[in-house]
């Protein structure tokens, strides 16, 4: 049997997609965070998630509001030691918070001690109050994007050359060693979908690309723009893995899931929501666009019934 996509393409009966889980590091305005119980709550969530999701992804914020929050790299290293069966990613690290040369050393070290399970999700940074609170400069967007692109070059140089040297407008290294050289070098996943500049950087530098969930027509348009940027740069569009991050509200009752999603449905980054059948249908549309990995955000951090339902009735459909 075959099925036909909305573009008239013949596709396999069961489209393939992988799923990762993004637990909270602090308040995200969608789940309950109990600071005194956070570690035990996280243990419970990851004990379940590691049985059904192929990867765990940690967000990078220092002072997103004024609430309890665990730093990204510290938490990712803790997870690496306790959950050896899953890949490990950042969604996404801010280039501004750590120098690229240090980031290369950190990433190479984690790749070594995790036996090659690391994916470096990387971005230009965006939340100005966080920069101000921690005393970081907040250059204009185009400058932050230039710094991001140079940062990727620094990291890749340090991961592949010994000694490594690089001299750019914003960063430089001179005969630096990043031993042991990561083997293989971790994929670098760049986040962002700005059409004028960001997708050009993705086309030039990214191994993977991550976008946020969008209305389907808009998501398809972003994918087409990336394809165009790849053509302009002489890059094979098929060599960039396309990933998406999505909030998921799932329940056996479609109406209850819809109620859970209230307040997010009209967001510029709309959620995936509904009963398992509706959620599966939504992901088939996402696959039709060209994504093959979804990093999932789930609201029930303590109860986990939504995670278990997702793992039982959505993940196997796309395996």
Image (tube, rainbow, N blue to C red):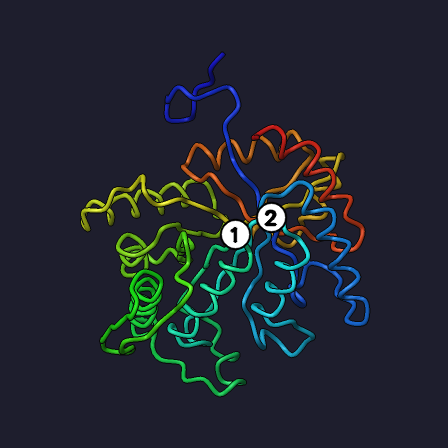
Q: Are marks 2 and 1 in contact (CB under 8 Å)?
A: yes
In the rendered image, residue 307, in percent from the top left (x then y), is placed at 71, 44
Within 10 Å of the Cα at label 2, are there few (<14), some (14-19), or many (20+) other Cα atoms?
A: many
Along the viewing direction, whichever of 76 and 95 lies nearer the viewer: 76
**Element marked by disc 2:** loop
Residue under the point 55% across and 48% down: 295
In the rendered image, residue 121, in percent from the top left (x then y), is placed at 46, 59
Q: Is residue 23 left or right of residue 187?
A: right
Along the viewing direction, whichever of 11 and 276 lies nearer the viewer: 11
Relative to 115, is 284 above or below?
above
Residue under the point 47% across and 78% down: 128
- Pick whichever of labels 2 and 1 is earlier in the sequence: 2
Within 10 Å of the Cα at label 1, are there few (<14), some (14-19), or many (20+) other Cα atoms?
A: many
Q: Between marks 2 and 1, how big is the CA–CA gap?
A: 7 Å
In the rendered image, residue 254, in percent from the top left (x then y), is placed at 71, 35
Along the viewing direction, whichever of 153 and 177 lies nearer the viewer: 177
Q: Is residue 164 left or right of residue 305?
A: left
Please give the label number shown on residue 199.
Answer: none
**Element marked by disc 1:** loop
Residue 152 sits in quarter: bottom left
Please give the label number shown on residue 86.
Answer: 2
Residue beneath disc 1: 117
Relative to 229, is 17 above or below?
above
Quarter that holds the C terminus: top right
Residue under the point 57% across and 56% down: 57
Along the viewing direction, whichever of 285 and 99 lies nearer the viewer: 99
Q: Is residue 288 left or right of residue 300?
A: left
| Residue sitting at the far bottom | 135
In the rendered image, residue 243, in percent from the top left (x then y), is placed at 46, 46
How many numbered marks have been drawn onto this rendered protein structure? 2
């Amino acid at each position: 049997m075959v099925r036909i996509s909305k573009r008239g393409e013949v596709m396999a009966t069961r489209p393939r997609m992988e799923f990762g889980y993004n637990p909270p590091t602090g308040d995200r305005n969608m789940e309950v965070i109990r600071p005194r119980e956070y570690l035990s709550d996280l243990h419970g969530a990851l004990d379940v998630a590691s049985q059904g999701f192929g990867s765990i992804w940690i967000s990078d914020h220092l002072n997103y509001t004024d609430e309890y929050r665990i730093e990204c790299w510290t938490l990712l290293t803790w997870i690496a030691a306790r959950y050896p069966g899953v890949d490990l990613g950042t969604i996404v690290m801010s280039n501004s918070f750590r120098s690229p040369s240090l980031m290369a050393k950190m990433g190479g070290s984690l790749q070594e001690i995790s036996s090659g399970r690391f994916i470096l999700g990387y971005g230009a940074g965006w939340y100005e109050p966080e920069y101000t609170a921690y005393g970081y400069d907040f250059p204009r967007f185009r400058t932050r994007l230039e710094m991001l692109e140079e940062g990727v070059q620094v990291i890749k140089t340090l991961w592949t050359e010994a000694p490594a040297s690089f001299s750019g407008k914003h960063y430089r290294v001179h005969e630096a060693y990043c031993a042991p050289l990561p083997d293989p070098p971790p994929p670098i996943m760049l986040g962002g979908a700005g059409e004028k500049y960001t997708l050009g950087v993705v086309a030039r530098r990214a191994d993977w690309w991550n976008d946020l969930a969008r209305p389907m027509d808009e998501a398809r348009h972003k994918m087409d723009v990336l394809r165009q940027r790849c053509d302009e740069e002489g890059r094979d569009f098929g060599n960039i893995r396309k990933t998406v991050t999505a909030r998921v509200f799932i329940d056996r009752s479609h109406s209850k899931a819809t109620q859970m999603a209230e307040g997010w449905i009209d967001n510029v980054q709309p959620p995936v929501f509904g009963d398992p059948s509706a959620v599966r249908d939504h992901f088939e549309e996402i696959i039709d666009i060209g994504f093959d990995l979804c990093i999932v955000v789930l609201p029930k951090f303590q109860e986990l019934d939504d995670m278990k339902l997702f793992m039982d009735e959505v993940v196997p459909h796309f395996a």
